[in-house]
Image (tube, rainbow, N blue to C red):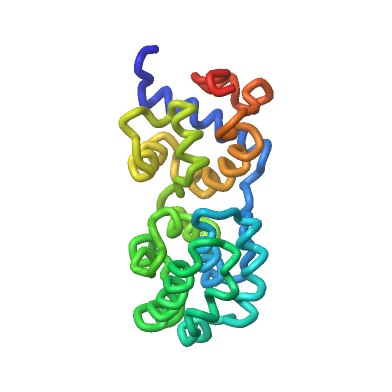
Amino acid sequence: MARESLASKKERAAQIEERMFAYYGPGKASLDYTTPYELTCAVVLSAQCTDDAVNKVTPTLFARYPKPEDLAAARIEDVEEIIHPLGFYHAKAKNLVALAQTLLAEFGGEVPQDIDLMQRLPGVGRKTANCVMCEAFHDPQGIAVDTHVFRIAHRLKLAGPSANTPQKTEDILMKVFPRSDWLYVNHQWVHFGREFCRAKKPRCAECIVGDLCPTRGEWE
């Protein structure tokens, strides 16, 4: 297959987003939260586990530590007890307490509305920062590339073999999608990855963007 031009990828990406928006709308976060602080903590907790599992522990966590001031003063062992079902709870509890302490020490207790500043918070990488910027602040400064987005971008061949890291995949997606679409891509593709473009046994025959996918049928 001849190498696809950037212009062609942009045109195909526009059609893909049109279908995604028609099917999923703007998308919605699977994590339950009420404030940017809560969302940031929830996304940190979601690493290596499901959003459903996170949603089962965060009501207790946020009831006990409703503000960064409360979490910053928490005993790590007490936080571990609450989040124990999620796995990696030692590291996650340590990061949550340190995150709250950093919010107080450097940002006046508020989650910074900047993707680079946010990554100064313990446990927060670019993917987490992208999620919070889009969901909590509606100010996309990038596209969160999780396992679903990475897989779909490569199956759709919007990202090529050289885009072999989440950062490189994000870089190409930001070129093929206009910034106005960055707000929606992660939410929509996570739902799409769970419903159609699954890691195992994807539903290629029923796929809503199947005719726009160069690898359709190769993964069934």
Asked which quadrant contains residue 167, the reply is: top left
Would you place residue 79 above or below residue 70 in this image? above
Where is residue 106 shown, x and y percent of the image?
A: 35, 79
45 relative position to 61: left or right: left
Where is residue 185 shown, x and y percent of the image?
A: 52, 43
Where is residue 33 shown, x and y percent of the image?
A: 62, 67
164 relative position to 85: left or right: left
At 35% from the left and 41% from the top, the residue drawn is 165
Quadrant for the N terminus, please. top left
Total marks placed: 0
Would you place residue 75 above or below residue 177 in this image? below
Where is residue 44 shown, x and y percent of the image?
A: 49, 63
Quadrant for the C terminus, please. top right
Q: Nearer the viewer, residue 96 or 25?
A: 96
At 34% from the left and 68% from the top, the residue drawn is 120
Would you place residue 47 above or below residue 181 in this image? below
Instruction: State the residue lying farthest toward the left.
Output: 162
At 63% from the left and 68% from the top, the residue drawn is 57
Asked which quadrant contains residue 207, the reply is: top right
Q: Nearer the viewer, residue 207 or 60?
A: 60
